[in-house]
Image (spheres, rainbow, N blue to C red):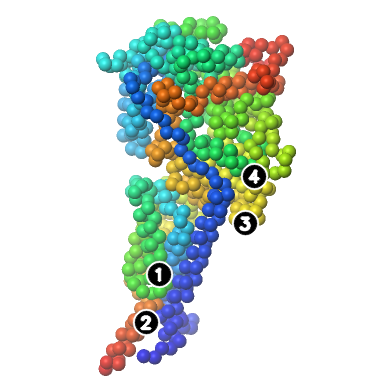
Amino acid sequence: MKWTRRDVIKSLGGLPILGTVWWAGASAGLITGKKRSEILEQLNIQASLPPVLPPIEGNPIRVGIIGFGIRGEQLCRSLGFATKEWLQEMEEAVKADPNRTDLKDFMNQEKLNVKLVAVCDIFDKRAQKVIDSFSTQENPVTRYKTHQELIRSGSVDAVIIATPDHWHAPMAIDALENNVSVYLEKPMTHTVEETYRLKEAAGRSKGKFMVGHQHRQTLSFITAKDIIKKGTLGHVSIIQTNTNRNDDNGAWNYDIEKEASEQTIDWEQFLGSAPKIPFNKDHFFRWRKWWAYGSGLSGDLLTHDYDRLNCVMEMGIPDSVMASGGIYTHNDGRNVPDVLQVNMEYPNFSTGSSQEKGKEKGMNFTYSATLGNAFDRPTIIMGHDATMELGNQLTIWPDNSSTKYAALLEAGKANPSTPIYQYNPGANVPDAISSATSQYFADKGLMWTYYDGARMDPTFLHLREWLSSIRNNTRLSCGIKEGFEEAISAHMAGLSYKLGRRIDWDHSTQKIKTLEGINFDEVLLGSIVY
Amino acid sequence: MFGTIKNWGLKESITLLRILIGWHFLYEGIIKMYNPEWTSFGYLATAQGPFSSIFTALANEPYIGAADILNKFALVFVGITFLLGIFEKAGALVAIGLLLLYYLAHPPFPGLDQIKVEGAYWFVNKNLIELVACMVIYQFPTAKYFGLQYLFDRKKETTKSEAL
């Protein structure tokens, strides 16, 4: 057999092509992997799980619900109690859209060792709904006409308070003074004065006190905390966080129920400390729109963002706050603003620095809210070395002028338009050098909050943490310290908006600096914007 | 290897097609093989269209590991068979199967989100076209003109003629 050059080329010509493509693919794959591991090694971020809670053993904890409105019903569901109406509604929803998982998620939720034994709601329909859905012969649910009777009944170990804001502190203080544990919705208080009284009551009480900022349970925030602690972003000079809503529900124009009347609602009790006005359904169902019962954007929604960041950064109460805004979209008789800008100053706060001494202090927290546009402005934490977008996922981009990542940037191993780190609790691994595709997946909100591989409701986790603390004396992630910081910061923002002045905090006396001739609580409760 | 332009015919064109598709598959497979962090999770988890539930199920444990490994090896297998010109029919069948899965996971049907595509597609996309190209390769084997198959065929011929 004789071989010609032609024979060799025709039979083995594919080999050099195969070798070349293999080499090119292998080096590209290895370089990507190496770049990743080099950056991840330098970042050394621990995507850690929260500590495991001890089980809630012994007799079931006896819980009473005060306020069974929209939020109260959601809280009960997270506790394991869904109304018959909701179950029916969800069954129909699944029929219409088989992809809905609400019902399945509820059914799969871990059962907590609790008994719902009491309800207090001043609207007959809502109280009756609780009785009809949850009261059984073995586990009867009793309705109490007032929170005082419920708290003193001796039948409850703990209460969940989901009432209008002006009732938060009076009820929580009363419960704590009677050593009943409290889970209180945000904002923690409605006035400055009661914030201090509640702090004292929580300190003295044998009951456990938790503020309902359930996002403290979000897995990504626990990782974000580690990111900040390790100085990944360098000196953070500004945080931008936002509320973007553009619908009736978002603007607090909730449904007015047809059963509502002076006969079915205890109007006097609803008003409490608020100015005495005749029965008004709009005020009852849409109380968030008036300072007399609610706290406007600063108390209602800023508190979410403030506490999210306080959870991650632990920056505490700002040295000063300036705010401005107005009612520009919903001219429907409300007196709380629907557009608000808040600037909080932290001149001495530091997240560490990669630069020479003297460049590590000072931060501004900016909150921008509108109820007239729902464009999804993300929360951004901006440091000298990197920027982090904070949400259910985390994304970090290096800064072009970073000191810390200068070598990586110079070597072309990182660039400002490509994330150096991406964290997704739903994905298997943290993703450094992410592709446009994984960015897309993250944006799509595909990834849920996972705990041990299971999809979880943060409100359930928050309630479980509180119940476990009642039984096992474990630490609370949003107790009175965190609640105090949230309430004072929100009140400073509300005061600044109304007074059109800068509000200062005195760290040594732990008090808001007085302004001559001004009673802060009168300003907060009143409808006048100066 | 392909002779002069004058001699260029269908045989040469299909051989070139086979080489290029082999090149594409091999590179896709190798780059994934050498990057230990690569996973098809995102691609499967965002699947759309009538078969999306099957693909999203594959994105979860315990299937995702096997899906990743099979995908990588199938890509490399197609690449090797096409480039070396050996078992090209088996390679073409595997390629058709893979491309069909890619097509069905993210079908370019109207009303569905087109994820990370660089063009505009309506029922027909590049996966589908490459799939049909692989059908041509299956039906018109070229390894006997260019590839290891040429070597074996030549050997056989020589043996035959020597026997005579």
Identify residue for label 2: B151
Label 3 resides on the chain identified as A
From what the image shows, is residue A411 above or below residue A258? below
Task: Tell me which amino acid carries mark 1.
Answer: Ile
For the point 44% across and 49% down, the residue is: B42
Number of the front mark, 1 or 4 = 4
Within 10 Å of disc 2 (Cα), the crowding (few <14, some 14-19, many 20+) is some
Mark 4 — residue? A385
**Mark 4 vs mark 2: in front:** 4
Residue B163 position within the rendered picture, expressed as x and y whole percent measured from the top left = 27, 92
Label 1 in the same subunit as label 3 = no
Disc 2 to disc 1, how far (Cα)? 16 Å
Quadrant of res A472: top left
Which amino acid is tagged 4? Asp
Instruction: Judge by depth and name the residue closer to the eye, A267 or A484.
Output: A484
Q: What residue is drawn where x is 53% and y is 16%?
A: A203
Secondary structure category for the residue under label 2: helix
Residue that carries the numbered disc 3 in the rendered image: A412
Q: Amino acid at mark 3?
A: Gly
Query: Which image quarter is the N terminus of chain A in?
Result: bottom left
Q: Which numbered mark, 3 or 2, is in the foreground of this view? A: 3
